[in-house]
Amino acid sequence: MSADIQTRLPINLIYVQMKLSYKFFLSILLLSVQLLSCKKYVDIKTSSTTSRLETVEDCQEILDNYGEMSTGYPSDGEASADDYYLDEQGWQYYTVNQEDRNIYGWISGTGRSSADPQWVHPYKTMFYSNLVLEGVEKLKNGADRQTLDQLRGAALFFRAYALWNVAQLYAKPYSASTANVDFGVPIRLTSDVNEVSERGNLQQSYDRMIRDLDEAVILLSNSSKIQTRPNKAAAYAMLARVYLSMENYTLAQTNANLALQLNSQLMDFNTLDPFAWPSPFERFNKEVIFHSLTTAGHTIDPGFGSVAYISDEVVNLYEPNDLRKEYYLDDRGDGVYYFGGSYDAGYDGQLFNGLTVDEMYLIRSECYARANNITEAMRDLNTLLLTRWATGTYVDKTANSSTEALQIILTERRKELLMRGQRWTDLRRLNKDNSFRKNLSRSITVGGQTSNFSLPANDLRYTLLIPQQVIINSGIQQNPR
């Protein structure tokens, strides 16, 4: 299949209206399923409890549906994080509604009223994944085993990827001591829209992600022709990200290492064109292990004309000769910067949040430091940073202790992964460490009146409220406030 599938929607748009149980389906999916086919009408027979794909081609076309499987992941975590700010004009911008302002100000007791898109999109991805898993099961006696393994592995990856993204917003930060009693997020394991949803506990949510990814590692091939198709490196990379969020640094290091064994290519920023429009980075560049985007966020819409400006705290972290400041940040003309360094190569209102080689170097480096292996920690970090500095100007960073190494590595992680959808998760896990916890604050002045906002470390508001539409229609438990 041509790589065109990554950059455009399939030619034929087909709407499949499913018979739904309104109460239960709306609580999780809130959609009339829209399936897109590259080549032909995808014949999906449906009832209130079953859906069926007829061929392996049908299954692959579902997984290759870029709009449903690779985009639309939640952005409210990045909108809640501390790497940007709004000025008066941004606050009053016509697309920034009161709910966006509540997210920006961490206003207690508030959340989204509608489930779309922050909650709906990842659950749609889970629905499609389950649809493919059921299709593969029905085809297992009449199709090539290797092909079916690839389809099953990809579907398992997507299901875990979507589940993790939901958990970063709507479940508490993972803690091994409380995960068996903390609320998880609903886990959907079938395409049956009548299935009643329950939250379960957080351990169950993470166990399911890991189980799906562990099987995906076995089934998937080492590489794929297009970076929207999961492969073994992507599954290892996602396991590394999951374990990092769980503070299981031993397994995060193991899986980051396995991912890097399959793909360790870094871009040399000296070879990029800083004046390339709309971004110096190519979509699907060689650092991308798996390509995905968040849903469009009103406050953090990237690129020219953005209302979100990168905080001075972040801007001032970049040192002289660090090319990331030039390639990641665009100067408005008066020393105010907005983000212009998306690995999606464009300004389409969506942020790149996919898996990348540089992230794997940073994960492995951090894990080495936490294991008191300072030499390997700094070697990984310097390997990465050498490609980010102007030629001939980089001097290796050194550390005399694991704590010093961690401070350097975490600062570089923030600079390197700017606006990649990881900052909120990092704040949530690092707040549990007194050495790195951070109390957030920001303010906005409108019409001469200044409003100040604060979010102390480990506050309940680090877990967002589930959209009210979901609570009303499902009856699942709301997060405390």
Image (cartoon, rainbow, N blue to C red):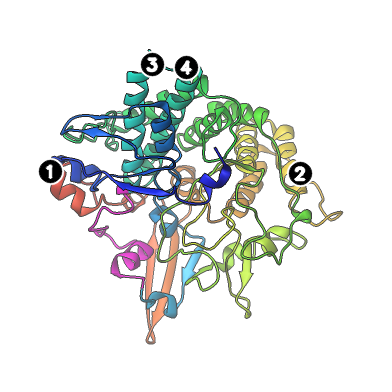
Marks 3 and 1 sit apart, C-alpha to C-alpha, by 33 Å
Specify the amino acid type for callout 3: Lys
Disc with the residue nearer the chain's start (2 vs 4): 4
Residue identified by numbered label 4 = 144
Question: Given the image, on which type of amino acid does mark 4 rest?
Answer: Asp
Q: Position of residue 345 (x, y in %)?
A: 59, 57
Decide if residue 179 is in sight here: no
Q: CA distance from mark 4 to mark 3?
A: 8 Å
Could you tell which of marks 1 and 2 lies nearer the N-terminus? 1
Image location of residue 384, percent across then percent down: 72, 44
Looking at the image, the residue that sits furthest to the bottom is 448
Q: CA distance from mark 1 to mark 2?
A: 58 Å
Residue 404 appears in the picture as rendered: yes
Dot in front, 1 or 4: 4
Pointer 3: residues within 10 angstroms few (<14), some, or many (20+)?
Answer: some
Please tell me which of labels 3 and 1 falls first in the chain. Answer: 1
| Dominant SS in magenta | loop
Relative to 336, say whether 369 is above or below: above
Residue at image location 14% in from the left, 50% down from the top: 472
N-term-proximal mark, 2 vs 3: 3
Could you tell me which quadrant the N terminus lies in? top right
